[in-house]
Image (cartoon, rainbow, N blue to C red):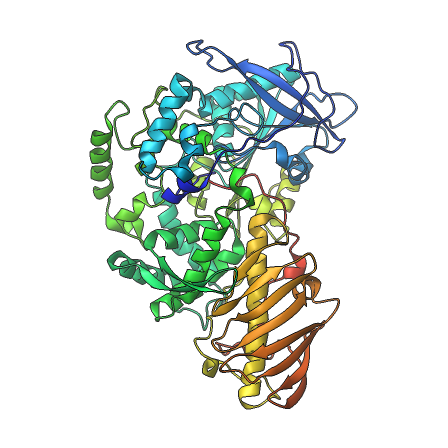
């Protein structure tokens, strides 16, 4: 999985290894399995010692920790090996998810899940320079990377894809398996493809989810920029952006052009509802687009926030930036081994410079290569964006300790299924088609309205059905769904006057009631967005509202303190989480206030029933699909997302690329 590493990443992350209890390393003749410290009884654990450096230039060994789930009473003849993303993601915490995801392959095959060298519990890579980055005030990110490289020494050349491939072969031999089904996601697909190149006789089949090309990502990630227009067009298909943006791609290009001249400035609100000044840059917009690649709720917000920013309403965009900044120090900071990511990426990405050149020469060569490309290659961004969040400005100072990656060679003619998300910006469908051309009879399945890591994010049954067909030798059927479970979010109203009245409730009271309903729907969308990042309902989270106020998520409710989505309308009280996300359970009693609102109280019940008193006017209505939305002629309910069907799955095989 490609990582897009903004400079602040290095200043925010500190490495903390995952700890566990593991059996003794396996002998050269086989693997000795015992109970796992933290896995279901279906899995058994072992470890395998492999050379750090197979040329023996650098002494030492690495202990690869693994889990195995047998298909029967005894080991099978062939096995499925799961390969996580990153580079740098640990796979062992995902064992149960992997077993469920690849279940059609496991009827007669064992499953092997392992942390690749330098990740998780397999001798995780660590650099003091990066651990202390949060305290570092004098060094640039590239200087920190150079210090990390020197700290690792010559061993830094032993954490490449080539070495991981040979680790898989060692596991195959130790396990006594004849052939392997390689199931990779994002960066894991690169490892799978290289194994297939070098050990074709031991490959039974390939399942490539969000595939890299065999040579890895191109340095400027031109495929990502090329994929932006099709992804936004698909998001807005079937009139999805009516009332939001006529041309979201053009809007994005216009905003990028404005941000090239000056950053966007405005106010956001912290977890206590206190306003603070915030600035959004072109880099922030790029980072949000990439983050939306893994979060469909965030992706759905982008057309509206970009359009609003172009029309003198920076608040919606700044709120997303603020939420992203708050998340950067959250629970998932240890999901990727950051030193391993930079080590592998810097050592083997095909950068536009000579590997033995000094930093200054590399920078000049990269700049020349960038400006030799036509600006249209980067639309709706510009050529300078080719360096945004990329590894080029970080790896320019990294001294390579390994030979250059070998050129791509032919791939074996083995059954291959390639899964691609129609809105994947990290590993676009273009990459999938390029790989498919190298493998005779490879089948490519593009899943609409889906981003990166298809199996972990596909809300339809399409990819699941494709896997079942593939492992029964039935041709894979295409996806024909037109249902977008996360349609574009509405434009936030700039004032209460822009909000339509709820039918049956007149004047300011009617507009206030509509604003109240829209505030609750925005709250639901925000909770889903944060929850998808965490893999669960975000209990304990606190965040500010769009126009003020704050929210605190408890074990049972969302507690609102003057939460404002429409200017001058504030909601206070507690909404049970079950009511908010599942439309069932106990009712919620809310106080309505604010400078523009019709003050009073509202009671929200299951079944979309709303009753109460606003400015002395009593009402009892049911919010139906025919109720007008706050900022568009179509129904507000069309903007609702299927929270009841979202189970907040665990982190998938790829968090970064």
> Residue at the spot x=37%, y=25% of the render?
149
Residue 77 vertical placement versus 434 (above, below): above
Residue 452 shows in this picture: yes
| In the image: residue 14, left or right of residue 278 | right
The C terminus is located in which quarter?
top left
**x and y percent of residue 170 in the render?**
57, 16
State which quadrant residue 368 falls in. top left
User: Camera-side residue: 135 or 605?
Assistant: 135
**x and y percent of residue 406 in the render?**
37, 22
User: Camera-side residue: 395 or 95?
Assistant: 395
State which quadrant residue 614 falls in. bottom right
| In the image: residue 577, left or right of residue 550 | right
State which quadrant residue 268 falls in. bottom left
**x and y percent of residue 632 in the render?**
48, 76
Residue 406 shows in this picture: no
User: Camera-side residue: 322 or 271?
Assistant: 271
User: Camera-side residue: 390 or 406?
Assistant: 390
> Residue at the spot x=44%, y=30% of the render?
339
Q: Across the whole image, how many numbered discs are drawn on residues? A: 0
> Residue at the spot x=38%, y=53% of the render?
284
**x and y percent of residue 66 in the render?**
63, 25
| In the image: residue 106, left or right of residue 349 | right
């Amino acid at each position: 999985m490609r990582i897009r590493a903004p400079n602040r990443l290095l200043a925010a992350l500190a490495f903390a290894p995952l700890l566990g209890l593991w059996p003794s390393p396996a002998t050269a003749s086989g693997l000795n399995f015992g109970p796992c410290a933290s896995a279901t009884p279906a899995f058994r654990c072992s470890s395998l010692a492999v050379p750090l450096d197979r040329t023996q230039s650098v002494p030492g060994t690495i202990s690869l920790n693994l889990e195995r789930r047998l298909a029967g009473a005894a080991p099978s003849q062939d096995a499925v090996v799961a390969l996580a993303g990153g580079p740098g993601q640990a796979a062992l915490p995902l064992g149960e998810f992997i077993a469920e995801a690849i279940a059609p392959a496991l009827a007669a095959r064992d499953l092997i899940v392992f942390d690749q060298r330098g990740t998780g519990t397999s001798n995780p890579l660590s650099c003091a320079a990066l651990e202390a980055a949060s305290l570092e005030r004098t060094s640039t990110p590239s200087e920190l990377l150079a210090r990390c490289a020197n700290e690792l020494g010559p061993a830094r050349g032993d954490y490449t894809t080539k070495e991981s491939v040979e680790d898989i072969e060692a596991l195959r031999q130790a396990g006594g398996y004849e052939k392997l089904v390689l199931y990779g996601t994002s960066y894991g697909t690169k490892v799978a493809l290289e194994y297939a190149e070098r050990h074709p006789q031991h490959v039974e089949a390939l399942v490539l989810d969000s595939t890299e090309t065999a040579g890895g990502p191109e340095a400027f990630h031109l495929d990502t920029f090329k994929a932006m227009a099709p992804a936004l067009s698909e998001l807005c298909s079937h009139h999805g952006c009516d009332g939001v943006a006529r041309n979201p791609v053009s809007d994005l290009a216009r905003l990028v052009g404005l941000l090239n001249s000056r950053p966007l400035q405005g106010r956001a609100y912290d977890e206590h509802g206190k306003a603070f000044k915030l600035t959004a840059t072109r880099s922030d917009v790029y980072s949000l687009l990439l983050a939306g690649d893994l979060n469909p709720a965030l992706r759905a917000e982008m057309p509206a926030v970009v359009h609003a920013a172009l029309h003198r309403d920076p608040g919606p965009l700044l709120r997303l930036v603020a939420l992203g900044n708050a998340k950067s120090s959250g629970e998932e900071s240890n999901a990727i081994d950051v030193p391993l990511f930079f080590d592998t990426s810097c050592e083997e990405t095909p950068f536009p410079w000579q590997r033995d050149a000094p930093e200054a020469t590399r920078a000049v060569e990269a700049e020349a290569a960038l400006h030799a490309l036509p600006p249209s290659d980067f639309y709706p961004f510009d050529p300078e964006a080719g360096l945004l969040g990329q590894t080029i400005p970080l790896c320019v100072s990294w001294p390579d300790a390994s030979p250059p990656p070998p050129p791509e060679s032919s791939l074996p003619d083995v059954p291959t299924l390639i899964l691609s998300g129609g809105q994947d910006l990290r590993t676009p469908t273009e990459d999938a088609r390029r790989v498919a051309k190298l493998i005779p009879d490879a089948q490519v399945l593009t899943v609409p309205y889906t981003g990166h890591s298809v199996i972990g994010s596909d809300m339809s049954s399409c990819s699941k059905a494709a896997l079942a067909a593939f492992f029964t030798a039935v041709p894979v059927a295409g996806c024909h769904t037109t249902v977008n479970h996360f349609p574009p979010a509405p434009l936030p109203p700039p004032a209460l006057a822009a909000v339509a009245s709820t039918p049956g409730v007149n004047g300011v009271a009617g507009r206030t009631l509509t604003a109240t309903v829209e505030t609750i729907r925005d709250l639901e969308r925000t909770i889903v967005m944060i929850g998808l990042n965490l893999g669960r309902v975000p209990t304990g989270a606190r965040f500010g509202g769009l126009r003020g106020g704050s929210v605190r998520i408890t074990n049972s409710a969302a507690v609102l303190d003057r939460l404002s989505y429409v200017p001058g309308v504030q909601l206070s009280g507690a909404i049970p989480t079950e009511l908010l996300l599942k439309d069932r359970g106990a009712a919620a009693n809310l106080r309505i206030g604010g400078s523009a609102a019709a003050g009073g109280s509202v009671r929200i019940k299951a079944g979309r029933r709303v009753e109460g008193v606003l400015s002395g006017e009593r009402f009892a209505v049911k919010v139906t699909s025919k109720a007008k939305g706050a900022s568009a002629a179509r129904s507000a309910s069309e903007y609702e997302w299927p929270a009841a069907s979202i189970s907040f799955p665990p982190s998938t095989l790829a968090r970064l690329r």
